[in-house]
Image: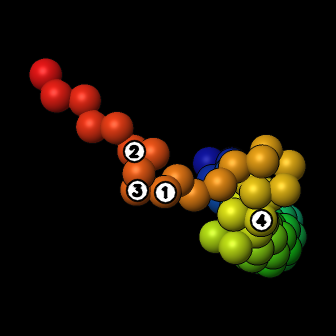
Amino acid sequence: MMLRLINIVLLLLIVISALGVVYVKHENRMLYTQLRDLQKQRDLMDVDWGRLQLEQSTWATHSRVDNIARKRLAMRTLDYSEIVVVKP
């Protein structure tokens, strides 16, 4: 009787252990899939970030800013004769 009880308990432990292995393996595959998706998303965001940096550097070039300042804001370079130095 005691031997039968031990065998049943051991069988239950083996089944529980096997189910645990299957569950952990499944969870591992799901997490790996999620990791790969997140890495793809990160790579796409890196590409977008590079494009945005390129666009920003294009919009901020010195010649473009100078051109806008002269045309839209009617700014100009001062002559040295127009510069006033204020002394304390």
- Callout in the foreground (1, 4): 1
Label 2 packing within 10 angstroms: few (<14), some (14-19), many (20+)? few
Q: Which SS class for mark 4? A: helix
Label drawn at residue 80 = 3
Label 3 packing within 10 angstroms: few (<14), some (14-19), many (20+)? few
Label 4 packing within 10 angstroms: few (<14), some (14-19), many (20+)? some
Determine the residue positioned at 13% across, 22% down: 88
The answer to whether one can see residue 15 in this image is no
Q: CA distance from mark 1 to mark 4?
A: 19 Å
Cβ atoms under marks 1 and 4 closer than 8 Å: no
Residue 34 drawn above or below residue 50: above
Cβ atoms under marks 1 and 3 closer than 8 Å: yes
Determine the residue positioned at 62% across, 48% down: 2
Identify residue for label 4.
Answer: 67
Determine the residue positioned at 25% across, 29% down: 86
Q: CA distance from mark 2 to mark 3?
A: 5 Å
